[in-house]
Image (spheres, rainbow, N blue to C red):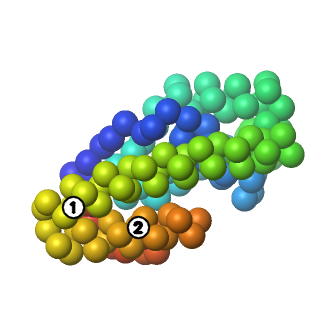
Amino acid sequence: MPRSFRAPQGILRTLILAYAARSPVNGSDIARSISKDTDGAWNPSPGSLYYILNELKEDGQLLEMKSEGERRYICTKKGEEEMSRARAVLRDMALRYMDMLHLLAKMLKHEDSERVALAKKTMSAGAQGHERLGRPKNTAV
């Protein structure tokens, strides 16, 4: 059974903008992508997801469009600007967490320490993704 976790505040908002910047999406698309990208560890509640979608739309960060009888959202220029700002904040937060994880991993196992060091280096370079972080799919960190 996959682990579940509580995501840092603001990350769902930024993820919604990121997915909507790639292509038009609906809430179900976003939920599936998050679950897939976290190997099932995070499944945001529909209430949270649709509440934030509506907030972003009302704030002008997302544009709602109808496609094949369903609502889809795309990121606006304002949304892209907010996403860039939020990514910088989240990146700094992630680097601080990586420092702590590096210390904890050193206390646990040598190979974990190396994996965390690789993750920190990757985060510093601005890359994302499980494989680039040295974490094989379907394994716990």
Q: Is residue 50 left or right of residue 138?
A: right
Mark 2 crowdedness (10 Å alpha carbons): few <14, some 14-19, many ≥20: many
Residue 27 visible in the shown view: no
Q: Amino acid at mark 1?
A: Ala
Report, in whole angstroms, how far the alpha carbon at label 2 lies from the one at label 1: 12 Å
Q: Is residue 57 above or below residue 85?
A: above
Q: Are circles 2 and 1 on residues that touch, CB within 8 Å?
A: no
Q: Residue under circle 1?
A: 105
Helix, strand or loop at mark 2 = helix
Give the image location of residue 50, x and y in percent. 61, 30
Give the image location of residue 124, x and y in percent. 53, 65
Residue located 33% across and 41% down the image: 5
Give the image location of residue 141, x and y in percent. 27, 60
Q: Is residue 49 above or below residue 72?
A: above
Residue located 83% across and 32% down the image: 60
Q: Residue under circle 2?
A: 119
Give the image location of residue 65, x and y in percent. 83, 40
For residue 16, the mark is none
Q: Amino acid at mark 2?
A: Ala
Asked where in the image residue 63 lies, by quadrant, the reply is top right
Mark 1 crowdedness (10 Å alpha carbons): few <14, some 14-19, many ≥20: some
Q: Nearer the viewer, residue 106 or 41?
A: 106
